[in-house]
Amino acid sequence: MRIRSLRVSLAVAATAVAATTATTGVAAADIDLGNSGSGSGSSSGEMVITLVRHTESAGNASGLIDTKVPGPDLTARGRTQADNVALQLADKDYDCAFASNMVRTEQTAAPTVAKHGLNLNIQPGFREIEAGQYEGTPEAEAMSGYLQAPIKWLSGDLTARIPGSIDGKEFDGRVDQALVEVQRRSCAKPVIFSHAATIMFWSMLNADNADPNKLGTDPIRNGGRVVLKGSPKKGWTIVEWVGRPDIG
């Protein structure tokens, strides 16, 4: 576990919350082991991982925080967006595909997986950060509730716990372990469908070049992605951050 302590101002954090919890098409509502992999990479070498946020779900349209498994389906717009994500990623040479154990990531992944001829592996470690007692509360109130603890994680306080849910150590540890499992499948270039909060907070905690300002200036919208190079043992570097994908 390689954790970087990042100082994040309340202004930046508030902007990030507003952008990630909006219910418009460009911003999502949640911040925001099955088949064997088909990869050809080393089980201990360097990887290039692509973390993709799911497209618009019914939860995004509701205006309420929804982090329960399996969660809601994609909207009709979200399904169209998923097709467009597959087109954007068509030229990538992924060797494995993973999704969290939530319906919206599995549905988002389907067109990309089909286009690349891959099996979709379900990995619960990539699921959304559980909202605990804030489940079902308005997303507009996330800054004063759901996201208070995750913001503290970025300042180095990994003991901060979302009431009724997990703390920073537990969150970071489960994503790290999920990536170890991906590597054990000899996946060198996996595409992983996950959730905005999971993608952004894990990347910010672990990448050696993380820019905390992006939480406010370029948060990950529906269908956005972060690409990192490295390994669970050596650590990670962000090589691409696409917060505003043109997917309709």
Image (spheres, rainbow, N blue to C red):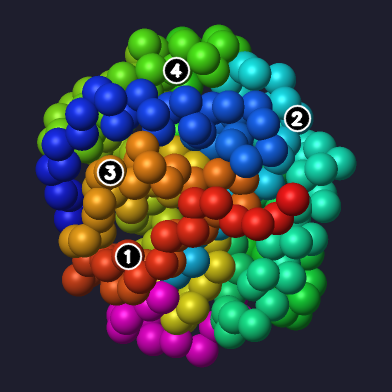
Task: Name the element at disc 3.
Answer: loop
Residue 38 located within the stretch drawn in magenta: yes
Query: Which residue is tagged 3?
Result: 213
Task: Name the element at disc 1.
Answer: strand
- The Cα–Cα distance between marks 3 and 4, rounded to whole angstroms, is 19 Å
Residue at image location 47% in from the left, 26% down from the top: 18
Give the amino acid type for the residue marked by disc 2 in the picture. Ala
- Magenta stretch, residue numbers: 33-48
- The Cα–Cα distance between marks 1 and 4, rounded to whole angstroms, is 26 Å
Q: Mark 3 or 4 closer to N-term?
A: 4
Q: Nearer the viewer, residue 87 or 235?
A: 87
Query: Which residue is tagged 2?
Result: 58
Query: Which residue is tagged 4?
Result: 142
Specify few, some or many for label 4: CA neighbours under 10 Å numbering under 14, 14-19, or 20 or more.
Answer: many
Q: Mark 3 or 1 closer to N-term?
A: 3
> Which quarter of the image is occupied by the N terminus?
bottom left
